[in-house]
Image: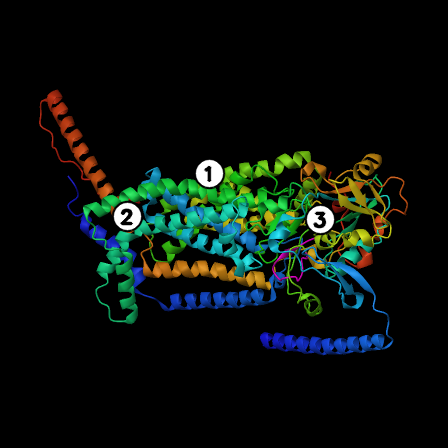
C-alpha cells in the first residue's frame, strides 16, 4: 500500500518550480557579476584589436616559442569540453539513474568550452583575415585540418546533444511564462516559442525525442574521443622531442576526461549553492562523481608514467635535454608540483571516503582544473625551448617565454566569455533537465509501487504459511514504505 | 591616429620618391646630352626579338631587361629538370658570417633573424667544435609542407621548398614542425625603411619580398638568382669558398670562385653527410666534415657574449645525433 500522503503531481510541481525559479529573477549580484564579465571581455577585445593592428609581436611569443598560452588554452578548453560526453552520454548509455540532475550542466560546459576553445587558435593566427583560405585551399593531409573537421563536428554534435533534451523544458518555460509585461519578457516569450519548435508533448514527439537522443548518445562518444586524439596529433605529428610520442592520443584523451569531469563537479557545486539545488544534487552525486574522477585520475597517472618514464629510462640525447630541464632544470618546480598536486594528491584524497565530501571534492577539482591548464602549458612550451638546433646568439626574449599582459587579457576574456554564456544560459533556461528528473521521479514511484506490491504479496504469502503452520490468523498490516525523491 | 600617421608617412614616401625620381631623370637627361654632345660614334649591335627576328639596334637605345618575377603558378612548379643541392665544407668555414651578411642584405632581412645562421657546434665534450652554417635544408621529405593546412608552403619539382606569403594564414604549424628551427615569423609590420625599399616590388614566392606581417619566411635558395644563372647570395658571398651550389641532375656544384666540381665526387672524397640524417627528412644540403681544418676552430667559451645574447647551456650545445 503506497503512502497516501505522497503526491506525485505535487512533487513534480515542486521540481518544476525549483528549476524555473532562477530564470524568473535577475538579482543585483547577477547584474554585478555580468557587468564584471563584460568589462573583462571588453578589455580582452581591446587587446585583441591591439594585437590585430600591431601583429602577434605584442605577445611574448617569439620564433622559438611560437606557440604559447593561446594554444595551451586551446588544448585545455577542448579538454574541458569532454565533460559533457562523459557524464551525459556514458551515464545515459549505461542507464545510471543518478545522472538526471547533472546532465544539463555537463552538456552546457561542453558546448561553451568548445565554443571558446575553437576561438583560441583563431586568436593565435597571424592572418585571421585569411581564414577563408582554409576552405579555398584546405589540405586534409594537415593535422590542423583534422582538428578543424573534428572540432566542428563535435561542436555541431554537442549543440544538438544539448538542445534536444532542452526542447520539453523550453516548452515548459514557454507555457509558464504567461505574463509578458516588460520588453524583456516579450523577448523571452518569443525566444522560448521559437526554440521549443512547436513541442506539445505528444506521444510521437516523445518517441522522436527519445529515438534521436539514443542516436546522438551513440554518435557523440567516438566523435569526442576523436577530437582530443587529433588535438594531440598537432603535436605528436612533429619530430620534436617531447611531442614525438605514440602515447599522446590516449594521454590527451585521458587528461581531457579527467579535467573535464572535474570541471563538471565544479559546475555542480556552483549551481547547487547558487540556485539552492541541494535537494537534487546531493552528497551522493558528489561521492559518485568523485569516484569517477578518481578512476580517471588513475588512468591519467598510468599514461603519465608511460609518457615520462619510458624516455627517462633511455635518456636519448635530444629527449634527454628536455627531460633534464623538466626533472631538475628550469621547469622542475612546476613539473613536480603538477605531478604531486594533480596526480598523487587527488588519488590520495578521493580514495578515502572522508575525502569525498562536497567541500573536499570541490577543492580537489579546483586543483585538478587549474593543474590541467598549467600542464598543457608544460606540454607546449618546454618542448619548443628544446629544439634540435642549439639556441645561439638570438635576442634574449627568443630563448625564454612567459605570457605577457596581452595574452593574459585575451585568454582571461575568453574565460570570462565562458562564464558569461553559462550565466546567461542559466538565467534563461532551467539548469536541470526537468523532464528527465520527472521521469526519474516516475520511475522511482513505480519502483516503490512495485516494492510495495511485492512486499504485500510476500507478507500475505508469509501469513498463509504461518497460518498453515500454526492454524491461526495473523494481521496483514504492512508498514508502508515512504517513497523518497530519487536522489536520496 | 595610427592611420593618420600611416597616411602621412605614405604621403611623405610618395612625395620623396617623386622628388628623387625627378632629380634622377633630370640628371640622366643631362648626362645623355653631355654624351651626345661629344658625339660618340653610335655602336650598333644585333638583337634577337622574342618572335625570332633579328634587328640591328643602337647600343644606347638598349636597356637592361629585368624580367618580372615569375607567376605564382610558375613559382609553385619550379625550374624543370633541375634538382638543386648545396654542399657546405666545414673544413673551410671559419665562421666569418659573410654568407649571413650577403643573405641579409639580399633579402632585406632584419637583424633579429638569419636565414643562414652560423652555429658553433660541439657534438660532445670530448669532440672538437666546428662552425656549422645552416640554411634551410629544402628537405625531400619536408615535415613543414606536410602540416600546412592551406598549401602555402610547398615542395617544387626542382627540390626547393618555398612559402607563398599571400596565402599563409600564420598558424605557425610549419615552424613547430621544422626540426631545424629554420622558419621565422613576421611578428610585426616590416620596418619603415624596409617598406620604402621593398614595398613596390611585385610579390612572388621566389622573391619572398615584400614581407607581410603575420606570415612565415625562410631561406629560399634564391630562385630568382638561379633563374638569372647566378649563384645564391650566401654561396657567392662566401670568401672561403666553403659553400657549393648546383644541380644534382648535372652532378655539378660551384663555389664562389667559380670552381665547379663533381657533386658525387666531392661527397665521396670528403665523406659528405647530412645533418640529423636519422630524422628521415632527406635534406638537400650536404656537409663535409671539418677534417684538416684550414682555420682555427671556434672558441666555445666566447660564444654568446659577443652578441650579448642568450646564455647557452652546455646541454643545448651538444648535438643530438
Name the spot of residue A186 as percent of width and height, x first: 27, 68
Q: Name the mark nearer the viewer: 3 or 2.
A: 3
Q: Residue at x 17, y 43 (%)?
A: A3
Tell me, yes or no, if residue A279 can be seen here: no
In the structure shown, which secondary structural element does the residue marked by tag 1 occupy? helix
Side (left or right) of B55 relative to A206: right
Magenta: main secondary structure: loop
Residue tagged 3: B136
Name the spot of residue B28 as percent of width and height, x first: 78, 75
Q: Chain of mark 3?
A: B
**Residue A308 sits above or below residue A461 on the image:** below
Q: Nearer the viewer, residue A399 or B174?
A: B174
Disc 3 from disc 2: Cα separation: 63 Å
Q: Chain of mark 2?
A: A
Q: Is residue B215 magenta?
A: yes
Residue tagged 2: A437
Side (left or right) of B174 relative to B308: left
Q: Chain of mark 1?
A: A
Q: Which residues are magenta?
A: B207-219
Side (left or right) of A120 relative to A469: right
Disc 3 from disc 1: Cα separation: 48 Å
Residue tagged 1: A295
In the structure shown, which secondary structural element does the residue marked by tag 2 occupy? helix
Q: Nearer the viewer, residue A89 or B104?
A: B104
**Residue A82 sits above or below residue A42 on the image:** above
Amino acid at each position: 500500500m503506497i503512502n497516501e500522503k505522497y503526491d506525485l503531481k505535487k512533487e513534480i510541481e515542486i521540481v518544476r518550480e525549483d528549476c524555473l525559479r532562477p530564470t524568473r529573477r535577475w538579482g543585483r549580484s547577477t547584474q554585478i557579476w555580468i557587468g564584471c564579465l563584460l568589462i573583462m571581455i571588453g578589455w580582452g577585445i581591446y587587446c585583441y584589436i591591439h594585437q590585430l593592428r600591431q601583429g602577434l609581436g605584442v605577445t611574448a611569443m617569439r620564433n622559438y616559442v611560437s606557440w604559447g598560452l593561446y594554444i595551451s588554452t586551446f588544448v585545455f578548453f577542448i579538454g574541458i569540453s569532454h565533460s559533457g560526453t562523459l557524464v551525459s552520454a556514458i551515464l545515459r548509455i549505461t542507464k545510471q539513474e543518478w545522472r538526471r540532475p547533472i546532465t544539463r550542466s555537463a552538456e552546457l560546459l561542453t558546448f561553451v568550452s568548445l565554443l571558446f576553445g575553437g576561438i583560441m587558435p583563431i586568436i593565435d593566427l597571424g592572418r585571421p583575415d585569411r581564414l577563408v583560405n582554409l576552405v579555398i585551399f584546405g589540405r586534409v593531409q594537415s593535422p590542423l585540418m583534422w582538428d578543424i573537421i573534428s572540432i566542428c563536428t563535435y561542436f555541431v554534435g554537442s549543440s544538438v546533444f544539448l538542445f534536444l533534451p532542452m526542447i520539453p523544458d523550453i516548452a515548459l518555460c514557454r507555457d509558464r511564462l504567461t505574463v509578458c509585461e516588460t520588453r524583456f519578457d516579450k523577448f523571452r516569450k518569443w525566444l522560448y516559442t521559437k526554440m521549443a519548435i512547436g513541442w506539445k508533448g505528444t506521444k510521437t514527439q516523445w518517441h522522436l525525442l527519445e529515438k534521436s537522443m539514443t542516436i546522438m548518445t551513440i554518435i557523440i562518444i567516438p566523435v569526442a574521443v576523436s577530437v582530443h586524439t587529433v588535438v594531440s596529433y598537432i603535436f605528436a605529428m612533429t619530430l620534436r622531442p617531447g611531442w614525438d610520442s605514440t602515447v599522446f592520443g590516449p594521454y590527451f584523451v585521458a587528461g581531457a576526461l579527467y579535467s573535464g569531469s572535474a570541471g563538471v563537479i565544479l559546475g555542480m557545486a556552483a549551481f547547487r549553492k547558487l540556485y539552492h539545488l541541494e535537494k537534487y544534487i546531493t552528497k551522493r552525486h558528489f561521492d559518485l562523481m568523485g569516484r569517477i574522477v578518481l578512476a580517471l585520475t588513475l588512468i591519467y597517472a598510468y599514461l603519465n608514467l608511460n609518457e615520462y618514464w619510458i624516455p627517462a629510462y633511455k635518456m636519448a640525447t635530444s629527449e634527454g635535454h628536455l627531460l633534464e630541464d623538466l626533472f631538475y632544470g628550469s621547469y622542475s618546480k612546476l613539473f613536480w608540483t603538477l605531478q604531486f598536486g594533480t596526480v598523487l594528491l587527488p588519488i590520495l584524497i578521493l580514495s578515502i571516503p572522508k575525502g569525498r565530501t562536497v567541500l573536499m571534492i570541490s577543492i580537489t577539482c579546483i586543483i585538478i582544473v587549474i593543474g590541467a591548464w598549467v600542464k598543457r602549458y608544460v606540454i607546449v612550451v618546454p618542448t619548443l625551448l628544446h629544439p634540435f638546433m642549439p639556441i645561439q646568439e638570438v635576442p634574449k626574449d627568443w630563448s625564454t617565454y612567459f605570457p605577457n599582459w596581452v595574452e593574459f587579457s585575451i585568454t582571461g576574456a575568453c574565460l570570462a566569455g565562458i562564464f558569461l554564456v553559462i550565466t546567461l544560459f542559466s538565467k534563461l533556461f532551467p539548469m536541470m533537465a526537468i523532464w528527465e528528473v520527472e521521469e526519474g521521479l516516475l520511475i522511482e514511484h513505480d519502483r516503490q509501487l512495485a516494492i510495495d506490491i511485492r512486499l504485500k504479496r510476500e507478507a500475505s504469502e508469509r501469513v498463509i504459511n504461518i497460518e498453515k503452520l500454526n492454524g491461526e490468523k495473523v494481521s496483514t498490516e504492512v508498514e508502508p514504505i515512504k517513497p523518497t525523491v530519487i536522489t536520496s | 591616429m595610427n592611420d593618420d600617421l600611416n597616411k602621412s608617412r605614405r604621403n611623405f614616401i610618395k612625395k620623396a620618391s617623386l622628388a628623387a625620381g625627378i632629380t634622377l631623370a633630370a640628371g640622366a637627361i643631362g648626362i645623355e646630352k653631355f654624351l651626345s654632345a661629344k658625339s660618340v660614334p653610335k655602336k650598333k649591335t644585333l638583337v634577337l626579338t622574342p618572335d625570332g627576328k633579328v634587328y640591328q639596334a643602337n647600343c644606347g637605345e638598349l636597356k637592361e631587361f629585368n624580367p618580372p618575377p615569375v607567376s605564382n603558378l610558375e613559382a609553385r612548379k619550379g625550374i624543370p629538370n633541375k634538382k638543386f643541392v648545396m654542399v657546405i665544407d666545414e673544413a673551410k668555414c671559419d665562421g666569418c658570417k659573410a654568407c649571413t651578411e650577403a643573405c641579409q642584405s639580399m633579402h632585406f632581412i632584419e637583424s633579429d633573424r638569419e636565414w643562414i645562421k652560423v652555429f658553433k657546434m660541439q657534438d660532445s665534450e670530448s669532440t672538437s667544435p666546428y662552425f656549422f652554417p645552416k640554411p634551410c635544408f629544402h628537405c625531400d621529405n619536408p615535415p613543414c609542407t606536410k602540416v600546412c593546412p592551406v598549401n602555402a608552403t610547398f615542395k617544387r619539382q626542382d627540390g626547393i621548398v618555398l612559402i607563398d606569403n599571400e596565402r599563409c594564414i600564420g598558424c605557425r604549424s610549419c615552424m613547430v614542425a621544422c626540426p631545424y628551427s629554420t622558419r621565422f615569423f613576421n611578428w610585426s609590420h616590416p620596418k619603415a625603411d624596409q617598406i620604402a625599399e621593398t614595398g613596390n616590388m611585385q610579390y612572388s614566392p621566389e622573391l619572398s619580398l615584400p614581407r607581410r606581417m603575420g606570415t612565415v619566411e625562410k631561406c629560399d635558395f634564391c630562385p630568382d638568382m638561379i633563374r638569372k644563372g647566378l649563384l645564391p647570395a650566401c654561396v657567392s658571398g662566401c670568401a672561403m669558398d666553403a659553400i657549393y651550389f648546383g644541380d644534382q641532375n648535372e652532378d655539378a656544384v660551384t663555389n664562389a670562385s667559380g670552381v665547379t666540381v663533381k657533386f658525387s665526387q666531392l661527397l665521396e672524397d670528403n665523406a659528405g653527410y647530412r645533418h640529423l640524417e636519422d630524422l628521415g627528412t632527406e635534406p638537400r644540403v650536404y656537409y663535409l666534415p671539418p677534417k684538416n681544418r684550414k682555420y682555427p676552430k671556434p672558441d666555445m667559451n666566447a660564444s654568446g657574449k659577443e652578441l650579448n645574447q642568450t646564455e647557452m647551456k652546455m646541454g643545448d650545445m651538444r648535438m643530438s645525433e
